Amino acid sequence: MLHSFPFGDTKMIIDLFTEQQGRMSFVTRRSTSRKGSIKKQYFQPFTILDIEYDYRQRQQLQQLKNVRIAHPFVSIPFDPYKVSISLFLAELFFYSTRDEQHNPILFTFLQNSIILLDELKENFANFHIVFMMKLLTFLGFQPNMEDYHVGDLFDLRAGVFVHITPLHPDFIRAIEAKRIPTLARIDYYNMSLFRMSHVERGDLIKILLKYYQLHVPNFPELKSLAVLQEMFN
């Protein structure tokens, strides 16, 4: 589950990333009754759902028939740090994959990442940085961060290190660019080994978001960033 919002007085629209169809939007009635089969509590960001629906190709909004929790969370809803990470990454994924079609490898990455976040008991402060980097490989514009030399700048438009200042303003100066090669080595399994200050982590997130903004059409300022920054400061 990526995003939901009210639609009229009694309905809501839900955006999901599905295994079979990729991105899909559904409309359903908002139920506050315990007896209702489709409850609004199901539609929290990054909730993993099993759904039943009648697919109609010409309709933009599909109709949900039944919904249930596929993987009940044990920690995410109860940990404010994990809540802030899940809100941020759900919003990032929502705006990065607007037109994403059937992509089972991306679906597996997303599902496994969410489950891992729920299972981790500690050392997950860099989780969102790893997710942001890994997602770029699926979006098709992963930067080249392996050819770094001391004194290089990083060209955000080209996604490469350069020796000469680019003729545009979208680059990272040498004093900041030296932190970027860290991103080429970090993954879910070693992320706890990369010790960063709040400032360093915040700077890397800003660099990555700038990169997303340059390469994803109409990528906005993320509202959830402020909550994430507050939690990890």
Image (cartoon, rainbow, N blue to C red):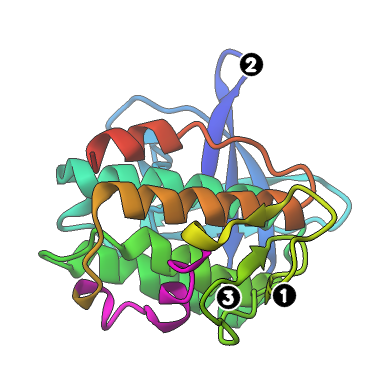
Label 1 Cα neighbours within 10 Å, binned few <14 / some 14-19 / many ≥20: few
**Measured Cα–Cα span from mark 2 to mark 1:** 37 Å
Q: Residue furthest bottom?
A: 147
**Helix, strand or loop for disc 1:** loop
Q: Which residue is mark 2?
A: 8
Kind of residue sitting beneath label 3: Leu
Q: Mark 1 or mark 3, which is nearer the start of the sequence?
A: 3
Q: Mark 2 or mark 3, which is nearer the start of the sequence?
A: 2
Q: Nearer the viewer, mark 3 or mark 1?
A: 1
Q: For the image shown, how many numbered marks are present on the structure?
A: 3
Q: Residue at x 34, y 54 (%)?
A: 201
Residue 233 x, y percent position in the rendering: 23, 39
Kind of residue sitting beneath label 1: Gly
Residue 96 x, y percent position in the rendering: 65, 55
Front in this rendered view, residue 83 or 131: 131
Classify 162 as above or below 52: below
Choose top left, top right, bottom left or bottom right for residue 103.
Answer: bottom right
